[in-house]
Image (spheres, rainbow, N blue to C red):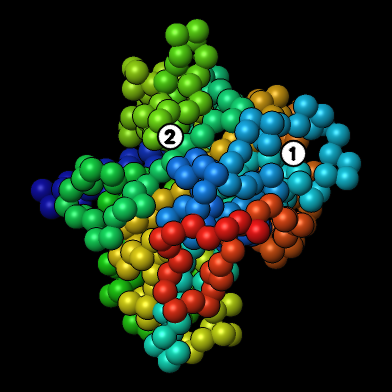
Amino acid sequence: MMLFRFLLGFVLMQLSTLNVCFATNERLFVSVNGPLVNARLDPLVNPNTCSGHVHSVFGSASFGSSIRKGDVTDDDWEDDTGKVNQTTSNVVPNLSMYWAPSLYIFNPVDDLYYIVPTFSRAYYRIRHPNDRSVINPFPRFLRLLAGNAARTTDWDATDPTEEGHDDISWNYRNNRQLTNYQEHGDWAYLREKTLDEIGSKLQVEMNINFPNCLELKSNGQPRTRSGNFRNHASYSNPDATTTCPVDFPYRIPTLNLEVRYNLKAMRAILDDDVVNNVTNWRLSTGDASGAGAHADFVSGWPEELFQDMLDNCDDGKALNSSVVCPIEQYMNQTRDEMNTKTVPWSNPVPDEIVSPVASLPSGGCPPFV
């Protein structure tokens, strides 16, 4: 009887935990972003010059070595006629910019590094079903950075509070699998997989949750940046109430950015065993651990549109039969069409080859062309 009560209690505890997990991940909608460019550009950390490593960029075609508020602003956003090429997002009024380190695979046959094709899916979530009344749209030109680009060693899974350990995990996937940043914040568990196991997957995914609480300025408006693009933002408390820390009271949705690196496409270029061997993987920073995962976000959402989606959308569809979810009109393409959307882009970039290369691009900045 005691064993039965123990097992029953354990099962109930697990179910309770699952209920909390599901409740704290209500999905509003997704913006699918095709690739824009792979280049040593980072207009937040390294404006007007080269960044220290190559980034894979998604979103607004205004992206470049520097950005201004006007680059992510369209006051006439309600009329999207002829604007399909202003962003690689399937949601045409979304002028947001997203970027993350490129993933390279080293080929020991020719001693070259090859960049992995990619796209991203930006899920916007609320952490609890009752949060809609207290969550605000993203303020225009909000700038955020998550992750630690300088990291090159595995995280200590026994110490999730280790400095710089944001909510970032890695998935290798055909379909969604549950991972968490404490145990899957690097490639350690992937290195334990067999070549056949990795070979059975189409993509490897960097899964990043950005902070969802903002600091307020003295005038009561949300702060949209700080010197390191981190200190003005924080994560909500990791419990069922999901309240914000007292110093960061302005609630916004959680941006859950999935950066998908296409392993299947690489197997058409390199030998399968080369692609499936995790020890050949390198982030563009030179990191071979995966713990250096990071990403940047600049919001280009019209606040009125985002408020409409907060009020009326649930998983990209109407919240109920009496309302209309404005994003539904942008979801009539196939998944492949959304994943591979490209647009004309000709902003200046460093004059260098980024793939294939004998060494990962870094160091001095060549002229822009």
Q: Which mark is residue 93?
A: 1
Tell me residue 197's x, y (percent).
40, 79
* 272 up-or-down from 243: above or below: below
Task: Look at 42% across and 55% down and name the residue there.
Answer: 52
* 314 up-or-down from 274: above or below: above
User: Residue 293's quadrant in the figure?
Assistant: bottom left
Question: Of 3 and 332, which appears nearest the observer?
Answer: 332
* 38 up-or-down from 32: above or below: below
Question: Of 30 and 144, which appears nearest the observer?
Answer: 144
92 on left or right of 297: right
Task: Look at 53% across and 83% down and name the residue there.
Answer: 267
Tell me residue 148's x, y (percent).
34, 49
Task: Look at 43% across and 34% down and name the residue there.
Answer: 229
In the structure shown, which secondary structural element does the residue marked by tag 2 occupy?
A: loop
Tell me residue 42's x, y (percent).
51, 48
Decide which of tag 1 and tag 2 comes sooner along the chain.
Answer: 1
Callout 1–callout 2 Cβ contact below 8 Å = no
Question: Of 223 and 329, which appears nearest the observer?
Answer: 223
Q: Residues within 10 Å of mark 2 (few under 14, many from 20)?
A: some
In the structure shown, which secondary structural element does the residue marked by tag 1 occupy?
A: loop
Q: Is residue 257 shown to the viewer in this render?
A: no
Residue beneath label 2, please?
Answer: 229
Q: Amino acid at mark 1?
A: Pro
